[in-house]
Image: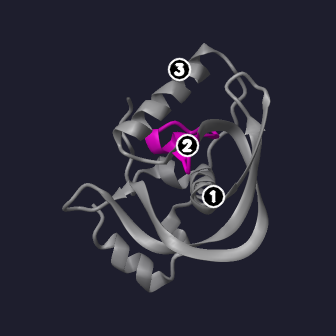
């Protein structure tokens, strides 16, 4: 398992690098990411959240689990859905648990990319899984969910973070 990086760590604000080698080290990293996500009670985890600047995320949400390497995200349904969202990298100062805020996201998305062996992956998602994919993809772009909040809401939330 790997330590989850928290807001303030520069790796969370830096776009991740593409994966170029599909080898044993990549497979081990994906397994460690899954274990780290489960240990933190998360539904998704991007490599930058454990200090690795690579375009990989793992997920286990809405009855589906897996990983995507070098993902691309396409919005299928531009309807905006406002729902609670939190982040393992933005814990509350007092509780250590993720802070949550109602965050706008697209209702439906498709993620394409590669699996751990370099084979093509394509997953269509709605609901929680679509939110998870958008959240993790943002991490790979150097963005956090608070960037999607109104400035006052983001400021209030961040006052509770370390």
Residue 27: quadrant of the picture? top right
Marks 1 and 2, how far apart at CA: 11 Å
N-terminal label among 3 and 2: 3
Q: In terms of depth relative to the viewer, which is nearer, 86 or 146?
A: 86
Foreground pick, 153 / 77:
77
Mark in front: 1 vs 2:
2
Using a 10 Å C-alpha cutoff, classify the residue at mark 2 as few (fewer than 14 neighbours), some (14 to 19) or many (20 or more): many
- Front residue of 98/130: it is 130
Q: Mark 2 sits on what residue?
A: 59
Secondary structure category for the residue under label 2: strand
Q: Is residue 112 magenta?
A: no
Residue tagged 3: 28
Identify the residue at image location x=51%, y=77%.
149
Q: Position of residue 115 (x, y in %)?
A: 70, 30
Q: Please tell me which residue is depicted at 53% across the width and 20% down the height of the picture.
A: 28
Task: Give how far across and how far down residue 159 sits, in percent.
Answer: 30, 73
Q: Which residue is mark 1?
A: 134
Q: Position of residue 116 (x, y in %)?
A: 67, 25
Q: Residue at x 21, y 59 (%)?
A: 95
Quadrant location, the N terminus: top left
C-alpha span from label 1 to label 3: 24 Å
How many numbered marks appear? 3
Q: Is residue 73 above or below residue 5?
A: below
> CB atoms at circles 1 and 3 under 8 Å apart?
no
* For residue 23, side relative to residue 4 (left or right): right
Relative to 20, is 8 above or below? below
Disc 1 secondary structure class: helix
Please state which of residues 107 and 12 is positioned toward the viewer in this rendering.
Answer: 107
Give the label, 3 or 2, closer to the camera. Answer: 2
Q: Position of residue 23 (x, y in %)?
A: 66, 16
Report the magenta residues as a range: 46-64
């Amino acid at each position: 398992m790997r330590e989850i990086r928290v807001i303030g760590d520069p790796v969370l604000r830096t776009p991740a690098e593409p994966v170029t080698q599909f080898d044993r080290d990549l497979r081990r990293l994906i397994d460690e990411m899954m274990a780290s996500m489960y240990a933190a009670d998360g539904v998704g985890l991007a490599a930058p959240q454990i200090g690795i600047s690579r375009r990989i995320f793992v997920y286990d949400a809405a009855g589906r689990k897996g990983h995507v390497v070098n993902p691309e995200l396409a919005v299928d349904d531009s309807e905006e859905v406002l729902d609670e969202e939190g982040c393992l990298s933005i814990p509350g100062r007092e509780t250590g648990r993720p802070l949550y805020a109602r965050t706008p996201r697209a209702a439906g998305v498709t993620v394409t990319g590669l699996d751990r062996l370099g084979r093509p992956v394509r997953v269509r998602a709605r609901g929680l899984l679509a939110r998870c994919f958008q959240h993790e993809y943002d991490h790979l772009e150097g963005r956090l969910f608070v960037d999607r909040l109104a400035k006052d809401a983001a400021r209030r939330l961040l006052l509770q973070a370390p």
